């Protein structure tokens, strides 16, 4: 029987990596780079601007390199490694200046931290730069909470919201915990749970167009759960989910809507109500 | 294969079957209710997160350790089992495995087989193979019995008939067994059991699966809740166990955490009602047990998975089904949609090695990569990562030598689209031109933009991009900063 196995490298067996310990956070820096993400760039630019305002409010100077584009996730999840690598390398070169990188999207931040090491697995030299970028990358809510240690005064009217976190944000970046804690700092905001809260909204990037029937069933369930939570609106820190959920609500002609957490937070702490 | 086929013609595909399943309200309710209950049970069975995570890490190490010594352990297993009086057979293909089983039955002039639950026997399509040779197999696991009675395949690896509710089972029993319809689950089980009880005594051969094959002691371990496993392996004069080569573990000590992980992850049970440890046929001074015990060890693509460092992790699987219980796709479309023996996330990553990825090219894409499966896997198989890997093999051109028999989704057109995407996202000038055009002409976005608009209204780009807003905002901030 064992002749079947002579081809295999004997030590090729992989062991799951140890659980990472809690992330240690640096002191609040003077400057950061904002990586805006391609979805926010085109569809939710105001939310990106609100993220910048929230950071500036903490006394941080924000850079927005005009050469930035996409983290590469769409090609990566579609199986196009070479194409991902080319786009990822462009971002890596651009962000290679030692500044902390703040990303208003858990899945793009997760792409930098969790998947760039896989994308560049064959390039030992690049991996050092990848590790350095991972170390400096923060999802927006994580950065506001743990690095800026924000202390906010809630200037808005009493309201109730439902929170949706993207799956990669939840599983790779713990965004659900950070976002909950941030919302908890606003004393006139009550966060309401919704049914199957941790379940995927059905977006999954290209999944939503490759499997529209299954994806559609998922987003219908998600939007129903959100509406039935009793909340006035949904907030999320991920542009992809937001596009999926709001696009579906619009198609259903529902009045309930979601918006990016950055916009919600900015409205609460600045007192500026957006149109 | 690369040509896009309209859904109306996709009757024999994942998408086509998914569409049908999604329209079946009863099926959707059955799965949602059952999966919700299983998720709750698992959560309750692991109240301590720290303990759960420690145990998962241990489970991963035990299985990875056993796999790193797989050839040696299999030889040791064969030696010990032979010493114990168990006859060991090796099968590279399911055809070979079926012939071995058939040979054993024929040598005993047997015509009746009673089976405990075994997914490997499903993989072999043993019942059909034997039926063609005039040997009747009767499934003795209640769920398996129900699907057999209805001429179906299992829809879940642990609960084969989970797609049916009690009323559907009652109707089936009424139609097939001529008993009165009843809503009482216990009564339904009693009806099934009465029918099965006599079969155990009359069968010539009992067939079962194996949960863990222990190399050091030559023991076959089998967990079950109905007692049918014990009956199938002890009542008939011959017991034939069939299993995959990845089920071997080093010693009994390793089995303790693995059984705990298996039963808690699968059904939220601290341990199953029955834990059978089979270490040989009846000895001269013993009163019961089979006269002969055989073990058929099946490869069927597993050694190919073994030879690939990344895909080898699929062999960690202990078949608990937690990944399907937690999968938002499986929950909505059910097991039959996958069209293969092993459904759900685990099915998507092990089936390609058994049948070739070109047979199931849609499977890796039928996932939002939400990660729920990987999060609950008791032996920490990185399922999303492996789905990702299969997507890569799927789109490789022949010149790129796709592995696992991939390449079915290679399309020059799609590759060309991604090349344009690369150009756009690596050349800032071009990207800005794209932003400019999209924001300026965004209102012209057609109402129908393909599959997306089946579930959504078309997204309309903002009038100004974040690039523009950020540039203006930051330069005005800088001016203000300069004045103060």
Image (cartoon, rainbow, N blue to C red):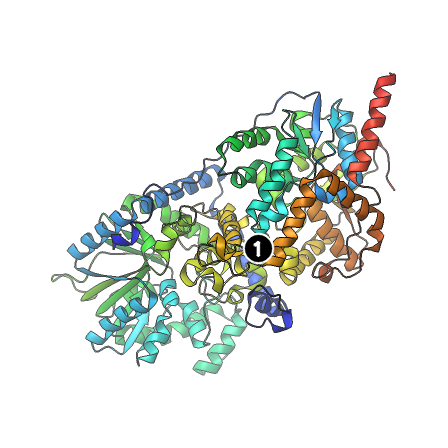
Task: Kindly identify the residue that appears in the image at 30 percent across and 78 percent down.
Answer: B135
| Residue B38 position within the rendered picture, expressed as x and y whole percent measured from the top left | 51, 55
Q: Is residue B256 left or right of residue A218?
A: left
Q: Residue furthest left?
A: B284
| Residue A1 at x, y percent in the picture | 25, 55
> Residue A49 vs residue B284: left or right?
right
Helix, strand, or loop for circle 1?
A: loop
Q: Is residue A263 left or right of residue B38?
A: right
Residue under numbered circle 1:
B367
Q: Residue at x 34, y 78 (%)?
A: B131
- Closer to us: A136 or A163: A136
| Residue plotted at (15% across, 55% down) | B83
Disc 1 chain ID = B
Picture layout, residue B317 above or below residue A136: below
Q: Residue at x 40, y 42 (%)?
A: A14
Residue B397 visible to the viewer: yes
Q: Front-most of B303 and A67?
A: A67
The local crowd at label 1, few if under 14, some if 14 to 19, many if 20 or more residues have their Cα within 10 Å, is many
State whether residue B484 is above or below residue A259: above
Q: Position of residue B242 (x, y in %)?
A: 30, 63
| Most distant residue in the top direction | B484
Percent position (x, y) of residue B40?
Answer: 53, 51
Question: Is residue A201 in view?
Answer: no
- The front one of B455 and B160 is B455
Relative to B305, residue B112 above or below: below
Q: Is residue A169 above or below residue B100?
A: above
| The C terminus of chain B lies in quadrant | top right
Q: Which of the pair A190/A172 is nearer the observer?
A: A172
């Amino acid at each position: 029987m064992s002749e079947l196995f002579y081809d295999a490298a004997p030590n090729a067996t992989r062991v799951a990596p140890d659980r990472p310990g809690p992330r240690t956070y640096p002191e609040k820096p003077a400057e950061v780079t904002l990586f805006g993400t391609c979805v926010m760039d085109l569809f939710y630019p105001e939310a990106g601007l609100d993220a910048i305002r929230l950071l500036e409010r903490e006394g941080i100077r924000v850079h927005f390199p005009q050469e930035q584009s996409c983290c590469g996730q769409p090609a990566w999840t579609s199986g196009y490694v070479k194409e991902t690598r080319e786009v990822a390398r462009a971002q890596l070169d651009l962000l290679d200046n030692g500044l902390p990188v703040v990303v208003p999207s858990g899945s793009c931040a997760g792409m930098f931290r969790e998947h760039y090491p896989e994308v560049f697995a064959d390039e030992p030299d690049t991996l050092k730069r990848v590790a350095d970028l991972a170390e400096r990358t923060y999802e927006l809510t994580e950065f506001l909470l743990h690095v800026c240690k924000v202390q906010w005064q809630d200037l808005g009217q009493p309201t109730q919201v439902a929170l949706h976190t993207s799956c990669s944000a939840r599983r790779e970046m713990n965004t659900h915990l950070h976002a909950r804690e941030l919302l908890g700092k606003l004393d006139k905001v009550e966060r309401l749970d919704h049914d199957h809260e941790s379940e995927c909204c059905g977006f999954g990037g290209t999944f939503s167009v490759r499997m529209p029937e299954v994806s559609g069933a998922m987003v219908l369930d998600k939007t129903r759960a959100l509406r039935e939570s009793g909340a006035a609106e949904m907030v999320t820190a991920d542009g992809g989910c937001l596009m999926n959920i709001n696009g579906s609500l619009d198609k259903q002609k529902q009045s309930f809507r979601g918006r990016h957490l950055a916009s919600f937070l900015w409205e609460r702490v600045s007192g500026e109500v957006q149109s | 294969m690369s040509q896009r086929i309209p859904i109306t013609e996709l009757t024999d595909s994942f998408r086509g079957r998914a569409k049908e399943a999604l329209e079946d309200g009863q099926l959707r309710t059955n799965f949602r209710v059952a999966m919700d209950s299983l998720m709750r049970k698992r959560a309750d069975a692991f109240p301590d997160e720290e303990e759960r995570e420690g145990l998962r890490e241990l489970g991963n190490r035990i299985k990875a350790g056993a796999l790193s010594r797989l050839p040696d352990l299999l030889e040791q297993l064969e030696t010990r089992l032979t010493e114990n009086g168990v006859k060991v057979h090796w099968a590279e293909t399911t055809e070979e495995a079926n012939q071995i089983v058939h040979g054993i039955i024929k040598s005993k002039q047997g015509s009746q087989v009673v089976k405990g639950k075994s997914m490997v026997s499903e993989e072999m399509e043993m019942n059909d193979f034997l039926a063609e040779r005039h040997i009747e197999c009767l499934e003795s696991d209640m769920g398996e019995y129900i699907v057999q009675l209805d001429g179906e395949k299992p829809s879940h690896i642990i609960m084969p008939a989970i797609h049916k509710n009690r009323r559907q089972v009652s109707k089936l029993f009424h139609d097939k067994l001529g008993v009165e319809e009843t809503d009482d689950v216990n009564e339904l089980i009693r009806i099934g059991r009465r029918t099965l009880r006599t079969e155990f005594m009359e069968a010539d051969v009992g067939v079962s699966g194996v949960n863990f094959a222990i190399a050091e002691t030559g023991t076959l371990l089998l967990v079950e809740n109905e007692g049918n496993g014990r009956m199938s392996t002890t009542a008939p004069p011959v017991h034939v166990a069939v299993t995959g080569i990845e089920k071997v573990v080093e010693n009994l000590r390793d089995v303790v955490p693995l059984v705990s992980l298996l039963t808690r992850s699968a059904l939220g049970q601290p341990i199953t009602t029955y834990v059978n440890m089979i270490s040989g046929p009846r000895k001269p001074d013993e009163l019961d047990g089979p006269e002969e015990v055989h073990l058929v060890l099946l490869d069927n693509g597993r050694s190919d998975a073994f030879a690939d460092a990344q895909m080898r992790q699929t062999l960690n699987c202990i078949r608990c089904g937690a990944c399907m219980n937690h999968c938002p796709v499986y929950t909505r479309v059910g097991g039959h949609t996958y069209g293969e023996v092993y459904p759900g996330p685990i099915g998507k990553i092990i089936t390609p090695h058994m049948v070739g990825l070109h047979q199931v090219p849609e499977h890796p894409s039928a996932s939002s990569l939400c990660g729920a499966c990987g999060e609950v896997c008791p032996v920490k198989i990185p399922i999303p990562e492996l789905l990702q890997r299969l997507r890569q093999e799927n789109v490789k051109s022949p010149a790129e030598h796709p592995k696992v028999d991939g390449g079915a989704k290679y399309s020059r057109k799609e590759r060309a689209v991604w090349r344009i995407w690369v150009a756009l996202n690596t050349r800032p000038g071009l990207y800005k031109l794209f932003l400019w055009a999209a924001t300026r002409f965004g209102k012209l976005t057609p109402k129908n933009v393909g599959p997306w608009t089946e579930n959504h209204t078309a997204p309309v780009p903002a009038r100004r991009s974040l690039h523009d807003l950020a540039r203006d905002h930051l330069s005005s901030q800088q001016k203000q900063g300069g004045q103060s």
